[in-house]
Amino acid sequence: MTIHIRQLTKTYKLGVERVHALAGVDLDITQNEFVAIMGASGSGKSTLMHILGCLDRPTTGSYDLNNKPMHKMGSAGLARVRNEEIGFIFQSFELLNRASALKNVMLPMIYSRKHWLTARSRAKRALERVNLADRIGHKPNQLSGGQRQRVAIARALVNEPSILLADEPTGNLDSTTTNEIIDLFKQLHDEGQTIVIVTHEEEVASHAQRIVRLRDGIVESDHPTAEDPIHRRWLAGAAAAAQEAADNTEPRPSQGHDTPATGASA
Amino acid sequence: MILFRIALQTFGLALGQIWSNKVRSLLTTLGVIIGVASVVAVIAALQGLKTTVLDEFEKLGANRVYIDGQLPRSMWATGSWRDVQLKLHEIETIRERCPSITSITPELWRSYPTEYGDRKLDSVPTVGIWPTWHDIVGRQIIQGRPFIPIDESDRRFVCIINDKAIEELDLPREPVGEYLRIAGKRFLIVGVVETVTLNLFGGGDSSAEVFVPFGTAQVLAPRAWISHAWGSLSSPEHVDDAKAEIAFVLRKMRELTAEDEDTFQIEVIQQFIDQFNAMAKGITAGASGIVGISLLVGGIGIMNIMLVSVSERTREIGLRKAIGARPGVILVQFLVESVTLCLAGGAIGLAAGQGLISLIRSIPESPLKDASVPAWAVILAVGFSASTGVIFGMFPAIKAARLDPIEALRHD
Ligand SMILES: Nc1ncnc2c1ncn2[C@@H]1O[C@H](COP(=O)(O)OP(=O)(O)O)[C@@H](O)[C@H]1O
Ligand SMILES: [Mg+2]
């Protein structure tokens, strides 16, 4: 079992008020799963991801990663886990603007005990995996949004983490680039990577094997993608929309960004 | 191990950043630059001054005692300086009664018109001395011979001139055996003594000097006063004994009571050296104060820029933590950055101080021509600037190390 979570809660204090961002979450994720976490804004997705990514500690409950109890670790221990076990991908990429793609990807290995000697070659290989071998020397401002996110993914992959966590990785991208990134996730998943991704797009979630829906800090539903009722309804709607689009006499070059239909039918 | 590697890497990165933000770095480290430059310049200048001054004192001889009559302040209204001048028998008594004084000589200064052939100088200082003068003053005889007791006892009309007098009187290069006419009397030149130039006191101009036996000088001017006397100590440790002995003798001979002040002064060169050293210490202390203040100001500048840097790079710090940087690592990174900044300032300060010193040194006739930055001052400057970096970088570094990664990544 890669991830094993029981009765996980996270409570924030805002003055006298208490916000129960997570109110008792049970979740198991096994190796090489591809899980999408969905839910309304404020339902606790990011909070859960931060705890999964060892960036934060739960208020109560247990979190075992690869059979090690993360909820009992100190901050230096968590830092090490973040460095060696976890690849985190952010919505806004979080690249260092003054550093080249290669240097950005090398960054985690600065803090690594194992890999710093081979940092450069590992970083090059990671960039090859995300198909950016030809952009090694480019700075982030010389790259498109999709390319930037791929650099960030290469950075997350470079220490060969056991889980890849992505909090709305396509939130800042247009639909074409979104597909690009989703394809990359699928490729990584096929190569054996365990992936947990937060998204509010059913289109993105459709590529995952499993959808976990949160609501007010608890798991509302947890189904394989094909059996998720909300997702099935969305699929039906998307099919209808695609049919409608096909019925239109003048088909446009598919650059629509407001309906998920183009992506789904592509 | 990992900390050391990161410190090293950060050092390189920090140097690069300082280089790419030259103006900002320069302004930030101005305090450190000024601090280090001034400490280096002051230390070097003092060092140079010390060398010069000690050289001068060395020429005068550290073992020498200067004895002179001196009218105490309380007697300015009633007494005359003539009453307190040294008498010959006082000097003779000191010679007999003071075991810590190994030898003594009076000096009787007068100026006389002096001629050699057609060449005539209106006024050449002529000093009457005992043969012991040579040992006490230590000026080298470069031609001929020094005075001997018979010159003194027979009051011979012989003289020793300095090499400057050879030029000024158009004497032959080897003037021993020639005759000078001093105050109308014929004097046989028996020797030439080296000219000693005291740069610090009385400027670089040395001129012709003539020395004659003390007794002979008295024959030329029977009523002249003894200017002062020089004695030599048996050893530098006997300074206090010697002073006490001389004071005892003179007070007794001058019939001074317990209430009366000394009517003479006894000075030892070592005392001048001590006084100079005390002054140098004072200047160093004063300079240290200034340096301390400028380093404080510089440190606050460093702290400020580091706080700005932490705040500007909050997201970056969050990211670094998110990918596995421990708090200690972030601390070291920022400390190394501020230390590097300060060291860069220190290096510029050192160079500036060195430049200042070369400038001062290039002034002709400067008493600071020997000024140079000693190695310990360089180490001091480097140490000071590094500790400024550590001390004033600590707070921003701790701030960075404590940042919560999630909060930091939300920062904009
Ligand atoms: N640092 C915090 N302090 C207080 N409340 C927080 C904090 N972080 C998140 N919350 C609250 O916790 C709840 C869940 O937030 P979040 O996990 O970010 O939701 P999502 O990512 O699903 O939009 C929200 O109500 C949010 O306001
Ligand atoms: Mg969120």
Image (spheres, coloured by chain):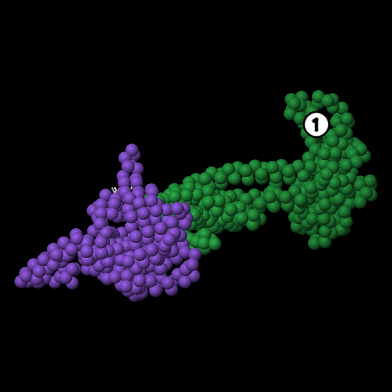
Chain colours: A purple, B green
The residue carrying mark 1 has its beta carbon less than 8 Å from ligand 1: no
Instruction: Say left or right for B47 vs B178.
Output: left
**Residue at horizontal 87%, vertical 33%?**
B248
* Element assignment for label 1: loop
Q: Chain of mark 1?
A: B
Circle 1: residue type: Thr
**Residue at horizontal 89%, vertical 39%?**
B98
Q: Residue A152, how many percent across, how many down?
A: 34, 65
* Residue position for label 1: B263
**Residue at horizontal 74%, vertical 29%?**
B73
Q: Residue B412, how many percent across, how many down?
A: 33, 52
Q: How many marks?
A: 1
Q: Residue A256, how many percent across, how many down?
A: 15, 66
Occupied quadrant, residue B170: bottom right
Residue at the left extreme of this rendering: A249
Instruction: Say left or right for B406 vs B249.
Output: left
Q: Residue B46, how many percent across, how many down?
A: 64, 49
**Residue at horizontal 23%, vertical 53%?**
A40
Quarter of the picture containing the N terminus of chain B is bottom right
Pick whichever, B251 or B331, lies toward us: B331
